[in-house]
Image (cartoon, rainbow, N blue to C red):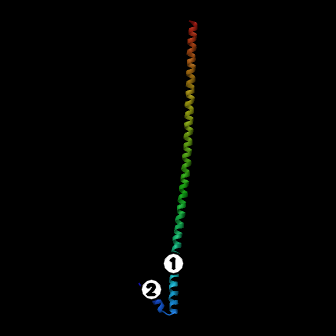
Protein backbone atom coordinates (compact mmCIF):
# COMPACT_ATOMS: atom_id res chain seq x y z
CA UNK A 1 0.00 0.00 0.00
CA UNK A 2 1.56 3.28 -1.06
CA UNK A 3 1.94 6.13 1.40
CA UNK A 4 -0.02 9.35 1.07
CA UNK A 5 2.99 11.20 -0.32
CA UNK A 6 3.51 8.50 -2.96
CA UNK A 7 -0.17 8.71 -3.95
CA UNK A 8 0.12 12.50 -4.18
CA UNK A 9 3.12 12.19 -6.50
CA UNK A 10 1.23 9.72 -8.72
CA UNK A 11 -1.81 11.99 -8.90
CA UNK A 12 0.34 15.00 -9.77
CA UNK A 13 1.78 13.10 -12.73
CA UNK A 14 -1.71 12.67 -14.20
CA UNK A 15 -3.31 15.25 -16.42
CA UNK A 16 -6.02 17.42 -14.76
CA UNK A 17 -8.88 15.73 -16.60
CA UNK A 18 -7.80 12.26 -15.42
CA UNK A 19 -7.36 13.59 -11.88
CA UNK A 20 -10.89 15.00 -11.93
CA UNK A 21 -12.28 11.71 -13.25
CA UNK A 22 -10.47 9.68 -10.55
CA UNK A 23 -11.65 12.05 -7.80
CA UNK A 24 -15.22 11.82 -9.14
CA UNK A 25 -15.03 8.01 -9.11
CA UNK A 26 -13.69 8.08 -5.55
CA UNK A 27 -16.53 10.43 -4.55
CA UNK A 28 -19.10 8.10 -6.17
CA UNK A 29 -17.64 5.09 -4.35
CA UNK A 30 -17.55 7.01 -1.06
CA UNK A 31 -21.15 8.14 -1.55
CA UNK A 32 -22.28 4.54 -2.12
CA UNK A 33 -20.44 3.46 1.01
CA UNK A 34 -21.96 6.34 2.99
CA UNK A 35 -25.44 5.33 1.82
CA UNK A 36 -24.75 1.76 2.94
CA UNK A 37 -23.47 3.02 6.30
CA UNK A 38 -26.51 5.29 6.68
CA UNK A 39 -28.80 2.37 5.83
CA UNK A 40 -27.10 0.16 8.42
CA UNK A 41 -27.32 2.96 10.99
CA UNK A 42 -31.04 3.29 10.27
CA UNK A 43 -31.48 -0.46 10.85
CA UNK A 44 -29.54 -0.23 14.10
CA UNK A 45 -31.64 2.75 15.23
CA UNK A 46 -34.84 0.86 14.40
CA UNK A 47 -33.63 -2.12 16.45
CA UNK A 48 -32.71 0.17 19.33
CA UNK A 49 -36.14 1.82 19.18
CA UNK A 50 -37.83 -1.60 19.19
CA UNK A 51 -35.74 -2.69 22.18
CA UNK A 52 -36.54 0.58 23.94
CA UNK A 53 -40.26 -0.02 23.40
CA UNK A 54 -39.96 -3.60 24.69
CA UNK A 55 -38.09 -2.42 27.76
CA UNK A 56 -40.68 0.30 28.39
CA UNK A 57 -43.47 -2.26 28.08
CA UNK A 58 -41.74 -4.63 30.50
CA UNK A 59 -41.11 -1.81 32.97
CA UNK A 60 -44.76 -0.74 32.75
CA UNK A 61 -45.92 -4.33 33.30
CA UNK A 62 -43.58 -4.68 36.27
CA UNK A 63 -44.81 -1.38 37.67
CA UNK A 64 -48.41 -2.59 37.38
CA UNK A 65 -47.53 -5.85 39.15
CA UNK A 66 -45.80 -3.93 41.93
CA UNK A 67 -48.81 -1.64 42.32
CA UNK A 68 -51.16 -4.64 42.46
CA UNK A 69 -48.98 -6.32 45.08
CA UNK A 70 -48.81 -3.08 47.05
CA UNK A 71 -52.61 -2.81 47.06
CA UNK A 72 -52.95 -6.47 48.04
CA UNK A 73 -50.48 -6.04 50.91
CA UNK A 74 -52.24 -2.87 52.06
CA UNK A 75 -55.63 -4.63 52.08
CA UNK A 76 -54.19 -7.58 54.02
CA UNK A 77 -52.60 -5.23 56.55
CA UNK A 78 -55.89 -3.36 56.94
CA UNK A 79 -57.75 -6.65 57.41
CA UNK A 80 -55.20 -7.84 59.97
CA UNK A 81 -55.42 -4.52 61.78
CA UNK A 82 -59.22 -4.79 61.96
CA UNK A 83 -59.00 -8.35 63.28
CA UNK A 84 -56.43 -7.35 65.92
CA UNK A 85 -58.52 -4.35 66.97
CA UNK A 86 -61.62 -6.55 67.31
CA UNK A 87 -59.70 -9.11 69.40
CA UNK A 88 -58.23 -6.41 71.65
CA UNK A 89 -61.68 -4.87 72.11
CA UNK A 90 -63.06 -8.30 73.03
CA UNK A 91 -60.22 -8.86 75.52
CA UNK A 92 -60.75 -5.40 76.99
CA UNK A 93 -64.48 -6.05 77.43
CA UNK A 94 -63.80 -9.41 79.08
CA UNK A 95 -61.29 -7.85 81.46
CA UNK A 96 -63.75 -5.08 82.30
CA UNK A 97 -66.46 -7.66 82.99
CA UNK A 98 -64.04 -9.69 85.12
CA UNK A 99 -63.09 -6.57 87.07
CA UNK A 100 -66.75 -5.67 87.56
CA UNK A 101 -67.55 -9.24 88.65
CA UNK A 102 -64.71 -9.17 91.19
CA UNK A 103 -65.93 -5.83 92.57
CA UNK A 104 -69.48 -7.19 92.88
CA UNK A 105 -68.15 -10.36 94.53
CA UNK A 106 -66.05 -8.43 97.05
CA UNK A 107 -68.98 -6.11 97.71
CA UNK A 108 -71.23 -9.12 98.33
CA UNK A 109 -68.66 -10.67 100.67
CA UNK A 110 -68.30 -7.37 102.51
CA UNK A 111 -72.08 -7.11 102.81
CA UNK A 112 -72.34 -10.68 104.14
CA UNK A 113 -69.54 -10.03 106.65
CA UNK A 114 -71.20 -6.79 107.74
CA UNK A 115 -74.60 -8.47 108.14
CA UNK A 116 -73.03 -11.32 110.13
CA UNK A 117 -71.25 -8.88 112.43
CA UNK A 118 -74.43 -6.92 112.96
CA UNK A 119 -76.48 -10.01 113.75
CA UNK A 120 -73.98 -11.41 116.17
Check the picture and name the quadrant holding the C terminus. top right
Check the picture and name the quadrant holding the N terminus. bottom left
Which element type, helix, strand or loop, lies under badge 2?
A: helix
Which element type, helix, strand or loop, lies under badge 1?
A: helix
Comparing 91 with 48, the one in front is 48
Q: Residue at x 57, y 36 (%)?
A: 85
* Label disc, if present, on residue 116 of the rendered structure: none
Q: Which residue is mark 2?
A: 5
Give how far across and how far down residue 5 sits, in percent.
45, 85
Q: Residue at x 55, y 33 (%)?
A: 88
Check the image and report above or below for 12 versus 74. Answer: below
Check the image and report above or below for 112 versus 101. Answer: above
Give how far across and how far down residue 64 sits, in percent.
56, 54
Q: Residue at x 54, y 60 (%)?
A: 57
Q: Which residue is mark 1?
A: 36
Give how far across and how far down residue 4 sits, in percent.
45, 84
Local crowd size for mark 2, using a 10 Å CA cut-off: few (<14), some (14–19), many (≥20): few
> Hey, which residue is sitting farthest left in the picture?
1
> Hey, which residue is sitting farthest bottom in the picture?
15
Left or right: residue 96 versus residue 7 is right
Comparing 33 with 9, the one in front is 9
Question: Between disc 2 and disc 1, whose residue precedes?
Answer: 2
Give how far across and how far down residue 102 sits, in percent.
55, 21
Q: CA distance from mark 2 to mark 1?
A: 29 Å
Which image quadrant is residue 93 in?
A: top right
Contact (Cβ within 8 Å) of mark 2 with mark 1: no
Amino acid sequence: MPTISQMYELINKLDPQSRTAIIALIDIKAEEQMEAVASKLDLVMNKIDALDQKIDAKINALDQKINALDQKIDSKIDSLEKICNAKFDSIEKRLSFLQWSMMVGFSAIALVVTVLKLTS
